[in-house]
Image (cartoon, helix red, strand yellow):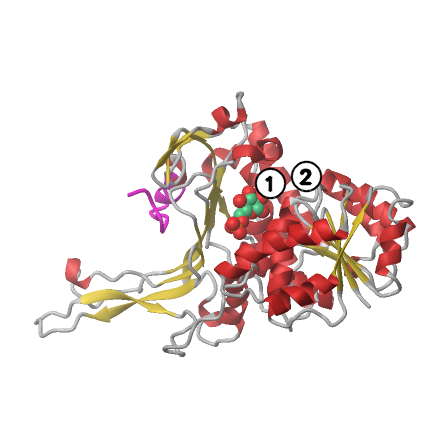
């Protein structure tokens, strides 16, 4: 019988995300028959106490989603077990190995990444890294290329690459996968998906939350390493990659890694022109006054809570089409979107005045707060005007257009998809070692460029879209972000 071991099984990630996701999978009958779920953590508690804690964290979420049934819970409860371990000691892992038994084991490391190397070494010695076993790693693995390699070398000593599942939870989001369907399941977009038709691409990952209590981690990472290195670059890869030959994990990841290799390095000389660093100061968030980052932190800090970058991809498809990326905390809205801005028509046959203005087509792939894909196209305003009047209309390509009246499927937590894929050994939506390495290499160059140029973050007021320089990044080239301060 197979087992899923959650190291850090009593921690925040496990309780808030992993166990509720497992419950939803259980509810929908998607967990493999006989799978055991074993929480492993330091605290010395009984199975009953652990099960009660899991129930408390799962029940509310499931009820809020109308997905709570005693029957599903009973099935999940029967799978659950708990072992107190020091995961860095092979000796201490023995009782866990006994519980796992002879079946294959998928271990999810929901613990501090600083422990990864020691844990995988102990797992190997304890027989938890046999052929067929798998390990799932949460980000951040490392803080730069060197520290990533150090940890990953230890992982590679215990597991071969096809047993390692590096999570980027953005890849588990439904719309991110839909992007692949949109691009490669249709003929109408792909011929236009290049610099001949696309003027530029914007990727925004905006959050309204501040750093708050997470500053001990965040202050060391900043927005560049916390968000751009992983989530934002992954979105960029899926937009920019060449069509893979199939959906095999390596076919997709080969294409993604080629994109990261083609990102133009940012030099100290260029940093000021193509990057913006920001840090929030006191302002408003969702209508309430909030403190600035340094006040939360309790001392001065040069860590960026916002980053915007103009990225050029030096390959045939994208030469001449810049990608503008931005992400930050305490921004005006929680909004994640990819904007594909097409070029204007080459010549307008319409009146050049306001009435005949032609807005270039724009495809907006919204991931958060709502999932939606919409295309703006020009249309004739109905009426008998002597001169034709035009207006842009939004065509929504979202789920439901074809299923009028049907209830949309429940919005799934990204971890449901990723846990299921890890359990099934499908690594398409996980990050391969060379991808992560290339991403760190590029990020290290940006960070060195900032150091070389003594480039400090600019202040922005909490509740806005970041420092005004982020606006200049586009306006300097005659463009504008899709979401801007009112
Ligand atoms: C995490 C970052 O990876 O992603 C957090 O460490 C961030 O800082 C979070 O808040 C955002 O995820 P989501 O799914 O809420 O957009």
Q: Position of residue 199 (x, y in %)?
A: 40, 57
Up-down relation of residue 287 to residue 51 (above or below): above
Q: Which residues are magenta?
A: 471-486
Q: Is residue 132 visible?
A: yes
Q: Position of residue 330 (x, y in %)?
A: 44, 38
Asked if residue 291 is among those painted magenta in the image, a careful observer would answer no
The foreground one among 131 and 314 is 131
Lower sequence index among marks 1 and 2: 2
Callout 1–callout 2 Cβ contact below 8 Å: yes
Q: Is residue 317 visible?
A: no
Instruction: Give the residue displayed 68% in from the left and 69% down from the top.
Output: 31
Q: Position of residue 225 (x, y in %)?
A: 60, 40
Local crowd size for mark 2, using a 10 Å CA cut-off: few (<14), some (14–19), many (≥20): many
Q: Check disc 1 and report the residue beneath it.
A: 225
Local crowd size for mark 1, using a 10 Å CA cut-off: few (<14), some (14–19), many (≥20): many
Q: Main secondary structure of the magenta part?
A: loop
Residue 472 appears in which quarter of the rendering? top left
Q: Check disc 2 and report the residue beneath it.
A: 144
Give left or right: position of 470 versus 263. left
- Position of the C terminus, as image quadrant, is top left
């Amino acid at each position: 019988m197979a087992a899923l071991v959650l190291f850090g099984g009593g921690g925040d990630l496990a309780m808030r995300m992993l166990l509720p996701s497992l419950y939803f999978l259980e509810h929908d009958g998607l967990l493999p028959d006989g799978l055991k779920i074993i929480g492993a953590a330091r605290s010395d508690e009984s199975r009953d106490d652990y099960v009660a804690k899991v129930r408390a964290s799962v029940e509310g979420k499931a009820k809020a989603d109308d997905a709570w049934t005693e029957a599903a819970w009973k099935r999940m409860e029967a799978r659950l077990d708990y072992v107190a371990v020091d995961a860095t000691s092979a000796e201490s892992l023995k009782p866990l190995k006994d519980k796992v038994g002879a079946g294959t084991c998928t271990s999810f490391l929901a613990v501090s990444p600083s422990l990864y190397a020691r844990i995988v070494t102990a797992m190997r010695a304890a027989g938890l890294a046999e052929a067929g076993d798998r390990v799932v790693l949460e980000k951040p693995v490392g803080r730069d290329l060197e520290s990533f390699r150090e940890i990953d070398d230890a992982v590679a000593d215990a597991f071969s690459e096809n047993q390692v599942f590096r999570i980027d939870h953005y890849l588990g989001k439904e719309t991110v996968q839909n992007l692949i369907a949109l691009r490669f399941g249709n003929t109408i977009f792909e011929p236009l998906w290049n610099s001949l038709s696309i003027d530029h691409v914007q990727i925004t990952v905006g959050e309204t939350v501040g750093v708050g209590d997470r500053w001990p981690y965040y202050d060391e990472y900043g927005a560049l390493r916390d968000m751009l290195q992983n989530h934002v670059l992954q979105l960029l890869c899926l937009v920019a990659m060449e069509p893979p030959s199939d959906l095999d994990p390596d076919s997709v990841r080969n294409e993604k890694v080629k994109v990261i290799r083609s990102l133009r390095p940012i030099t100290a000389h260029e940093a000021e022109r193509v990057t913006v660093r920001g840090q929030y100061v006191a302002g408003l968030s969702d209508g309430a006054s909030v403190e600035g980052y340094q006040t939360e932190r309790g001392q001065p800090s040069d860590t960026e809570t916002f980053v915007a970058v103009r990225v050029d991809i030096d390959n045939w498809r994208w030469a001449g089409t810049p990608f503008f990326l931005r992400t930050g905390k305490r921004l005006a809205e929680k909004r994640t979107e990819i904007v594909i801005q097409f070029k204007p028509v080459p010549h307008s046959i319409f009146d050049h005045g306001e009435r005949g203005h032609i807005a270039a087509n724009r495809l907006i792939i919204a991931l958060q707060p709502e999932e939606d894909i919409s295309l703006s196209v020009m249309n004739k305003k109905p009426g008998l005007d002597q001169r034709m009047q035009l207006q842009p209309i939004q065509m929504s390509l979202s789920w439901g257009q074809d299923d009028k009246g049907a209830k949309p499927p429940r919005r799934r937590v990204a971890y449901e998809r990723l846990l299921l894929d890890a359990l099934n050994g499908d690594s398409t939506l996980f990050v391969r070692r060379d991808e992560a390495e290339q991403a760190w290499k590029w990020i290290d160059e940006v960070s060195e460029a900032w150091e070389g140029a003594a480039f400090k973050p600019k202040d922005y007021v909490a509740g806005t879209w970041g420092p005004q320089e982020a606006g200049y990044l586009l306006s300097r080239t005659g463009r504008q972000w899709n979401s801007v301060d009112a």
